[in-house]
Image (spheres, rainbow, N blue to C red):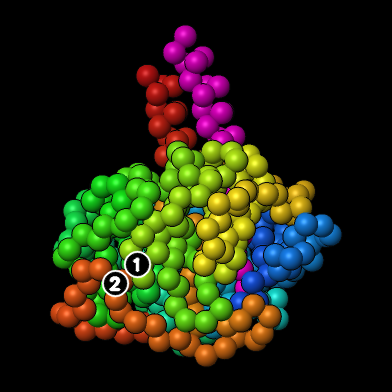
Amino acid sequence: MKSLTLVPLFVASLASTALAASSCVAFDSNFNLLAFNYGGKDYNAGTQDSWGSGTPTEITTSGRPKFDTDGVTCYLAQFYNAVYVLNADKSNPSSVYIFDAASNSWSTQSVNAGGPDMSSAVSILDHDTNVFYTMSSAKLWSLDMDPLKAKASSDAVTWNAVGTPTSFKADGYQPVMGLAQNHIHFLNTAGAGKADIFVIHFSYWQPETQTYSGPEFPAQHGQVASIFQSEGVQQEFAFFPDDGSGTFVINVENNSTRSLPGPSVKDAAATYAASITALVSSSSQSGIQYLPYSQNGDNSGAKWTKVEKLANLTPPPSSGNGNGNTTGTGGKSTGTNTAPGSKSTGNSSTGGNNNNNGGMKVGKGATAGMFGALLLGSLGVLLI
């Protein structure tokens, strides 16, 4: 009887693996909403004022990644009008795929061995330096994308080890990383309404835990999206806890939090992106939705609404094993309807207890395995 029971379980597991696919939403530097790998195609839905109706423009071109992993993430390099895509091809899991939004073209950047495990990594793309910071297995890494801009180089790039956190225990920690003011804010490390901070420009772990006033965001895993500005570095990021209890926007200038409605459907596997005036959610259960957001307004009447222009697009089902951040930030700031502008310098303080001393600035710088393990394990049990 045991064998008869395990056979359908094995088949069901294979079906789940086959269905697990990848897609993501992102913005270009003019804040056109881009949807990658929906029904195997890519689309440009235009700017927020056009999302209420119409048909998106297909931008599928050759050279794109296979999007055959579960956990692909997309990051806007705002200054270069490029989108960097991580963990998008199981045959080349370490490669970085670069989408040049100005020309709708792709290039593939090879990466030397020895970096983080991208299948379990969580990353941000720093706004000023255009450097990835990635945490995997309790260790922080950096990868300099600034020399590449919007096109891959023929030379492989290398991940650099930054080190392990000194201000919190990272063993067993599933990273939740928010970026603002060139600081990485690690949530779910010190309790509700608090974060531990890494100061990027000084490669420095702030010893003091940062506390935020206002509604407390919960101490749990979730997704994060940094909110862009028309100029200057990001001042805020949005946190979407896995339980769907709300949307929490954290301002690092005044160390405060505001609470907004959570997406209408609770989906821990949803992915997110942010522009200057909108937060976007993509879920296999509710499609692509957005929450209008004013960085200077009270947002009391804001509601999640379908992006009607993408109403027919729904991402494939996910295994729900999201690693953390689902979209990124980066590059240099531009206006909403202009070509990329100049790099902003920002500052290195969150306005709290940051001590920007110590250390030097960092230089600008599974599916197949799962299938095999599942097959061998299942067959082994069947033979018992």
Examine the rendered structure and indicate whether residue 380 appears above or below residue 199: above
Whole-percent x and y of residue 124? 42, 67
User: Mark 1: which amino acid?
Assistant: Asn
- What is the magenta segment's predominant secondary structure? helix
Front residue (pair 262, 196): 262
Query: Would you say residue 238 sits in the magenta stretch?
Result: no
Give the residue number, with chain letter if any, for mark 1: 254
For this orientation, the residue located farthest to the right is: 54
Examine the rendered structure and indicate whether residue 147 appears above or below residue 264: below
Front residue (pair 195, 163): 195
Front residue (pair 63, 336): 336
- Rounded to the nearest angstrom, the CA distance separating label 1 from label 2 is 6 Å
Whole-percent x and y of residue 300? 55, 51
Snapshot quadrant of residue 373:
top left
Whole-percent x and y of residue 119? 43, 55
Q: Evaluate whether residue 85 shows in this view.
A: no
Q: Is residue 113 left or right of residue 62?
A: left
The magenta segment: 1-28
At x 44%, y 62%, the residue is 237
Front residue (pair 240, 21): 240
User: Mark 2: which amino acid?
Assistant: Gly
Q: Tally the marks.
A: 2
Q: Evaluate whether residue 383 shows in this view.
A: yes
Give the residue number, with chain letter if any, for mark 2: 351
Q: Is residue 379 left or right of residue 360?
A: right
What is the crowding at mark 1: few (fewer than 14 residues within 10 Å), some, or many (at least 20)? Answer: few
At x 57%, y 88%, the residue is 341
Query: Would you say residue 18 sits in the magenta stretch?
Result: yes
At x 55%, y 22%, the residue is 8
Q: Are marks 1 and 2 in contact (CB under 8 Å)?
A: yes
